[in-house]
Image (spheres, rainbow, N blue to C red):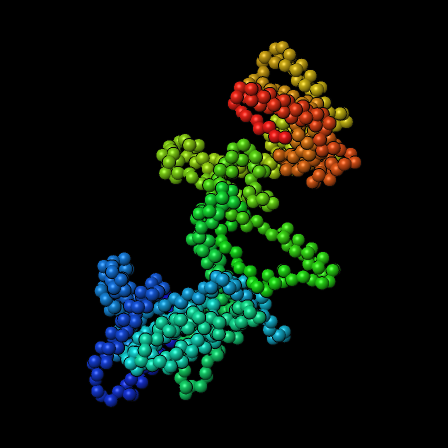
Amino acid sequence: MDTPWELDLERALVSQLAECRDLDLANDDGEKNEFTNDENCAAQRDELTALASIFGNDLSGPAAAGAKRTAFALEGGDEGEGIEGEGEGIDEGEKNAAGERLLRFDLEIDLRDTETPTRVFLERGNSEQPALDLHVGLASCLPTVRLSVIFPKTYPSKRAPVFALSASWVPRFALNAAATSLDEIWNACPGDAVVFSWVEYLRERAVSDIFLCAVDGERHVKLRARDGWRGDDASPVSQDASSQQVVRGVPRARSPDEALQVLLRTCAVNRVTRFARALHTCGVCFCDDVSGTQMRRSDGRVCCFDIPTLKSQETASTSQNTDGESTQKTEEKYNDSTQQKKCTHAFCVECLSAMAKLHVAEGAVGALRCPEPKCGASLAPATIKDVLCFGDDSGGASATATTHDASSSISPGAALFERYDKLSLERGLASMADLVYCPRCDAAVLEDEGDHCGQCVQCQYAFCTLCREGWHPGTVCLSPSARMRVLEARARGGKAGQNQSDEARRKHREQVADAMALRYVEREGKRCPTCGAGVVKSEGCNKMHCVVCEHYFCYKCGEGVVGYEHFREGGRCSLFDVEAIAAWEREVNAGLVVAEARERDAHVMGLAVRETRC
């Protein structure tokens, strides 16, 4: 079913056809000139074939298929090959009032200019306040404008083509002004093929003179309700009934808000399409011929080009402020905006996939960050799922798996993402200071404030969140060493221990292992001040990085640190211990002795010649 704007377009074309028919009848002197009609018909077909050859898929309508077929044949192809539609030649069109077949086609005129961004303004106001133009964004391209044309019988010898302009973002006032300019082009050169000149005018001059306005070297689109949109009763055309002026501008948008949505959507789709067609350089493998479809953004959004910066923005950012206080405020504002700027870096899917699969397999989900230096933003879950499932063969094992074996139907990428999801949940829960797990059923339990008591909602077991034993109010928890002695005594309990079930023995072994780990951390390591995870330093400096909560702390005093100010000279803690520095020096000296011995042996054996200089 036709939409209202298409009905308005048909009314505009049909009314112009009726007007041309009446004028032809009024000027007809009864003489028939068949030769002139044949010339008009040949000129129309030649022009339409040329338009089909130039614009290709942008040309549509009843007569477009035959024109494309003829143009394809003239270019050396077989007539009809690769062209949709049936029939031969240009034999479809619009009928006029006399039943004659006329050529009808639509041409989508591309106005996109990706080099010059356009400011979009939306008029806001009411009866109480004056209307103001509100700047709502930038557009790097413009939607198309449709030129609908019907060749009358006497074109191009006597009559101009019947036409109408329609657009999804241009108001009726601007479309009618562009139609008037097209009439002027025909009046300047009557009798010539004029459609291509119309297209060039709409692409070049109409964009800057009618559709847009230039302000301080910038292009502005002003969407105002008073310029006339679809469904408006009042339109900026002549209200004189005697003139019988036909409306040839048909807007598709109902309001400036709808036109704004079309503008922004077209801009976004265009930037995504151009990115997909271009070649890019990956910042990880430095491959410079990666297709846009093989790039993935760290934030999970669709890869696209950014909107070009306006010259006024570049000038404002590079201009120097003579006022010291204003300059400081400007720099602070710039730093804040830079810190709040989201990550938009993109890399090839193969590099991100290899990185993500390695970290997830090793359980280091906290290391899934943007590979761009000085960025470090976390990868979005959508990006992680995409790159983990990259390379999975949908027609492989998952398609041939049996229904009773559900585990084999999961692809490797899906299994990795399930592991990532589980590890992320565990990592998030571990970062909660008041969350523990029940020692009986492993359910998550929230700790009561102040008394370190937790009660499981599943098994109703009340336990101490410090030692994970039964709740013992008023008594001190057993130390890891004392707990280890109690467990060992239980293991030596004789028949009571031998008669335990497999599940009881398994839990006993887990308790022993936990107690041994706690005792080892108590003797040899430290605990993270943020999440309480145990950390044991094997070598290196005293600035420790917790892999559970991603925080940094000092290994000597246990305080959280940011940067290296905590380890400055004269502070309480040193970055390296004296014992670590001495061990490093011994290792380096031993390596130097070995290297000198090997070099001396090689020189003696004649395998190396040392050049002696004064």
Q: Quadrant of the N terminus?
A: bottom left
| Viewer can see residue 10 | no
Q: Quadrant of the C terminus?
A: top right
Give the camera-side residue of 416 and 540: 540
x 56%, y 22%: residue? 603
Q: Position of residue 459 (x, y in %)?
A: 61, 30
Eyeballing the image, is 417 above or below 200? above
Q: Position of residue 471 (x, y in %)?
A: 70, 27
Eyeballing the image, is 39 above or below 484? below
Give the camera-side residue of 210 and 468: 210
x 39%, y 78%: residue? 185
Q: Position of residue 303 (x, y in %)?
A: 49, 51
Eyeballing the image, is 58 above or below 373? below
- Residue 5 left/right relative to 556: left
Give the camera-side residue of 533 and 506: 533
x 55%, y 50%: residue? 344
